[in-house]
Each structure stands twice: as C-alpha cells, then as structure tokens.
Amino acid sequence: MKNKNKESRRTFLVRGGIGTIGIIALGSCVLTNPIRRVGLDMVENTVAPYIGKGTKANLWIEILQNNTIVLHSSKVEMGQGTFTGLAQIVADELDISMDQIQVIAASTDRGILDRTSTGGSFSIASLWMPLREMGATMREMLKMEASKKWNIPVAQLSTNNGVISNGSQSITYATIASEVEKWKLPKTPKLRPTNSYKFTGKPIKRVDLKQKVFGDPIFGMDAELPGMVHACVVRPEHVGASFRSADTSQAESMPGVIQIIKKETWVGVIAASISQALAAKRTIKVEWDIPKKWTEEGIRELLQVGKGNRMITQKEGKALDPEDKDVISIDFSSPIGAHAQMEPNGAVAAVEGDKATIILSTQVVGITQKQVSKALGIPLKNVNIIPTFLGGGFGRRLNTSHAVQAAIMAKEVGRPVKYFFTRKEEFQNDTFRPPTHHTLRGKLDQKGYLESLEHHYASGDVAINSVLLPGIVNSILGSDVGAMRGANIMYDAIENHRSVQWHTTLPFATSWWRSLGLLANTFAIESFVDEMCIKANKDPFEFRLSKISNKGYGKRIKGVIKRAAEISNYNDKIQNERAMGMAASIDSSSPCAHVVEVSIENKKIIVHKVLCVFDCGVAVNPDQVRAQCEGAIIMGMSGAIHEKMTLKDGQLYPTNYGPYDMALMKDVPKEIEVVLIEGADKPYPVGEPPMGPIAAAIGNAIRRLTGNRLTDLPLKIT
C-alpha cells in the first residue's frame, strides 16, 4: 500500500493493534517470583485484545451492490452466537439495520489474522472497541465522500439504515462506494454513547439462524472440492505408542484404494470413498513401540500435590503449618475429560504447485496456516485457510495437525483430499482435559471466620506445550496459566492465603478444555470454603462476603453473591427431600454465583433448579449471554456428575458416546434462571466463566442432604 491514507474501492483497512506482549517482556527481564505472580494475575484477569497480523491488506468490511454489508470476522463461530454480537456492534456504529449485515469467518486470503485465535471467551470482549471504531470510521468515510459529491459540510449529513441524507437528497452506501476510486482515511471519530444504540444490549435474533434451521453446508464436514478423494490415517491405540513400521501390502490391493502414503510417524490411506479407505486401513499391520501400558492408578501416582514443578501463583501473609492441630486439610480430585464435540476433527485440502487451500473447523486460523506452510515448504501467503462454522469447539479445535496431514496427502496424490477422524479416533486421540489433584488447608479465627486458606493443585499440561503457547509460559512465567484458571483464591481479605501449582507433563496429550482449570479448581476451593463455613456454623453468603474486599474486582464479586442471596431465598434446611447449595467464582474478570436445588433418587443426583447471577459487564446480546450461561451450566453439570475418561491396559477409554457418560436432555434442570448484572461499562468474557461454580454448588447441596463431603469428580453417591 503506497499511501497510508488511501484504500481500495469498497474495502476498509484496519491495521493490527498493539498487543500485550509487555507482560511477557516484563517476565523475561525480571524472573523473580513476586514479579511473576503479578504477571500471572494480569494474565488471569486481563481480556486479551485483538492482535492483528495479515499477509495482505486487512479487509474487514465489504459493501455489496445491494447495499448489504459483509463483515469478515477474525473470530470463528462455535455455535455460541458470537457472529450475532459482532454484527450488533458494527450495525450500531455503521448505522445499518441487522437485516443488512452478514458475518463470515475471514479466510487468510482476506489478510485478517488474530494472533489470540478464538478461545478464552474473548471474541466479543476483545473486538468491542476495534469494531466500534471500525464501524464509526467507515460511516464517516462514506459521509465525507457524500459531502464532496454534494458540496455540503459533513455536519449537515445524517445516516440511517445504510443511507446518507442531507434533508432533500439521499444516497445509499453502495452507490457512494461504487463511485469512489480512492478512500481518505479520517481520524477515528468520537463513538456514539452506548445508550443510543439500537441493537447493542438488545435480544436480537441470531444471524446464523436460517443457515442452521435449513441445514446449509456450513460445517467442516460439509466441505467438498471438485475431484475430491477420501483419506484416513493409521493411529496408535495405546498411550505413548510410537510408530515403527507397517505392512501395507494387502491394503494396496483393496477396492477403491488410490495410494498408500508412508511417513516416518504415520501411514495414510487414500481411496475413492471413505468406506473404502477405512476398509483398507483395517488390513494394515502396524508394529508399535509401547514403552509402558499406563493405568489410571499409574497416572494418579504420577500426578499429585508435592510432585512435579512447583510454582507459587499467589502469596499473601504466612504459610500454614500442616502440623498445627487447628488446621483442616481436605484433598480433592478430577478425572481426565474428553471434549466429545459433535463434529470430529478433519479437513479438506487441495495443493496445486506452491499454493494450498485448506477448509476446516479451526480455532487457530493463523497457526494452521503456518503449520501447513512449513510442512509443504511453500510461502505463508500461498496457504489459504478457509475456516467454517465449528460443530463444537471447547478447545479441541486449537490443535489442527490433521490439516497438515490432509495437505501432505493432497500434495502427494495430486488431488483434493477429505480426511476426518472416526469417532473412536476422536476419543482416543483427543487433547484431553488433564486430571487434577488438590489439597486445601484452612484455619478459622476465634470468631469463626477464615484467617488462613491455602490451595495446592497438581495438573497436567493446559497451556504449556500447546500450539498457542509452546514453551513460552513455562520458561517465562514458570506456571501453566491454563491450569491456573480459577486456582487463585478470590477471598483477598483473608489475612493469610496462597496458591501453589504442581505441574507434570503426562504421557498422553492434555490441553485446553472449556474453562481450562476453572471447573476443577473452583470445585476444590468452593467445596472446602463451604466445609469451613459449616464447621463455623455460618451463613454461606455472609461467610464468603466477609472475606472479600472492595479492591480490584471485589465489589463485582460481592455484587453477584449478594444478588444470589436476595433472589434465591437460600436456607440450609432439607425441604421436600431437596437441599440447596451455593458457590461463586471469578474468571477472566467475569464474576458468577450459582445457587442450586438438588435431590438424590436411587443414588442418582438430580439437579432441579439453578440460579445463575452473572456479571459480564455490557451484555451485547442478553439472549446470547443467557444461552451461553445455560450451556456452560449444563456442560459443567455433565463434567461434575457424569464425565470421566480412564485407562485400561494402556488405552484411553471409552471411545464412543454412550459408554462415555454425559448429561442428556433428561438430566437438564427443569429451571435455569439467569440474572445479569452489568457491573462494568464494557463487555467481559461470557462463554466459560459460568461453568466455574456449578460443580461446587452441587457438591455443597449434597453435603447438606447427606452429611458427607464428596471430594472427587464426577460426583457419585455410593
């Protein structure tokens, strides 16, 4: 681009923003624990901004000839309504109707790459200001062009529904755009006050509703290319197994087989149909090196508080003396968890010469582009990643090595290749939620309130060794910030409190899973705090509120707890064979409190009602926020009561739905009430924070029903 103030016709350029790498730079220069803990706290409570980088002009907005606006989003849609929220933000500042805007995920050929990818519940929160500024700037650019056309001051022009007027004349955005050869880029105009917005803050219907109702081909599994063939890859079934050799002689003569591709660590089968590829794959005799047949007991022995790399992630006051007779200590644990998303991983790839096109469901568009470029040895700009709608994400789409394998097979066979995991492969080769072990210690003062609280937690990899933060987190911050989510104690008015992480890399892949460490960490902390509350014979709301200050996020945390107390009519009594339980947490600056009603029938835990009080700041689309809260609660319930992966004879099990127990429609509470508090003047993350308190709230209700404290997930009545 020769002139930084001139842009191409019908496009608008937004330059990549400045990222928060200052935090990392600080950590790398001063590696003392206090500085690290400040950095860790910032990472845990800071909304990651848009950090843009592209190989071409960053073309976000198109104005079509029919006066429709197309927003090319740097974030993908995982089914949570993100595209709708982004459309609302742009429509309000650009002054168009919701019927005039479409949102699609930007391919890398558009040049829009967000280096923070899609995850962490940051999509709307991180794009709140960039999209408002973008919409406002483009509106003013269009008005400036109309001003020149009519030779009247910009101040005399108004906009509405994509039309510019001067009182006597009107012209559409599309008409103006079609007449402009060079755009002049003004300074960012003053943004409109949010209370004047027509769409933001309103329950607008979803922009992707029609596509999903009519079953349009919008997901990765729907993708097709002309002349496409199908492929599968031979994968190990044992944990830690490595490829030695393969006898493919029988597979090579199977019906429909086009080519067998042998690589150093894998074998690919390419055939005319997926059934033919799978049939041939079953005849391949592979020799695997299996150094050890792991068991669940072996993993539990490996992963314990006191073992692995130690890092103090929070420290205030004095440490507890474990030998003190007044110190109470309880251990908690959570199991391996699968993502179990509906759409298995896969990709459609085409390679022609030094150019590649990959169509897939991915949360890491830029990373996938880099991986394919490196594997094929072609320029980055020649790899076009086309992201689709995701049939479930939850962190599983952060790892896209299958895109590389699809690209390699497409290059070798000289035809487009479609390659997807089977359901069994998806379960056995997931990047799992790591199991955890926690030790909580606490001590009450003479008035029956907490004077000391410690959380020691052991976990496998979440952020460490992942594609998002390979090696950086461990070497600079000394901690796995993913495992740390929810691990620090929010009760900052407790005189002595600390959290200590014990990290171990496990023999199978573990990584990001929705809410990361939040569910397990909050379960352990809030269950223990509740137990101390019972021992002190205190009200659970007042007990918690007494130890939260008004500093930092304290006021907003107290706000959701107080509101939950007011609405729920909570009491500790068993009524109609039901008991209530409550818990609270804060994640990514969004505090949440749950109150549940639970009963037990034939040793089965039944959740009848959930009250969720949630403060995400500005709710761009309240219906979307409530739906995400409901989804997080149900997924959290599934993890709390049902889900568990284990190891049998060195293999991860189960390998399909059904044996992998998950919450079903019949398990969903009859009533989920979501109350939103806007305790801030901007949006904060929504998708994961409401998952935090649910397991602890259920466990706390069971404690009142049975008198027993359940300490292991999934919760079971024996």
Image: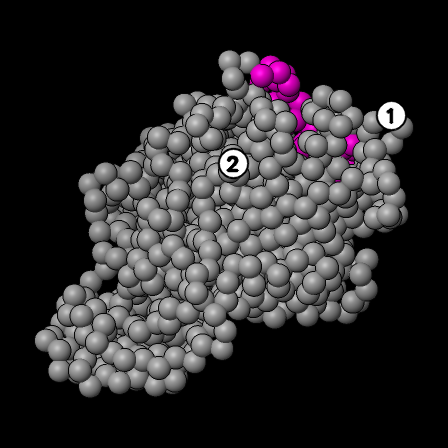
Q: Residue 718's mark?
A: 2
- Mark 2, secondary structure of its residue: loop
Give the quadrant of residue 251.
Answer: bottom left
Tag nearer the camera, 1 or 2: 2
504 with respect to 105 (left or right) = right
Q: Secondary structure at mark 1?
A: loop
Residue type at mark 2? Thr
Q: Judge from the rendering whether residue 214 lies leftward or rightward of residue 602; answer left or right.
A: left
The location of residue 49, given as percent across then percent down, is 57, 53
Q: Which mark is residue 447?
A: 1
Q: Nearer the viewer, residue 380 or 580?
A: 580
Question: Label 1 vs label 2: CA separation?
Answer: 36 Å
How crowded is the residue under tag 1: few (<14 C-alpha within 10 Å), some, or many (20+)?
A: few
- Amino acid on which the number 1 mark rests in the picture: Lys
Identify which residue is drawn at 23% across, 73% down. 281
Highlighted magenta segment, given as a residue range: 547-574
Where is residue 74 drawn, in percent x and y? 43, 55
Residue at point 67% right, 22% down? 562
Residue sitting nearer the eye, 209 or 592: 592
Residue at point 24%, 43% (across, down): 211
Q: Is residue 375 magenta?
A: no
Task: Mark 1 or mark 2: name the one nearer the start of the chain.
Answer: 1
**Rendering quarter of residue 588:** top right
Q: Nearer the viewer, residue 385 or 665?
A: 665
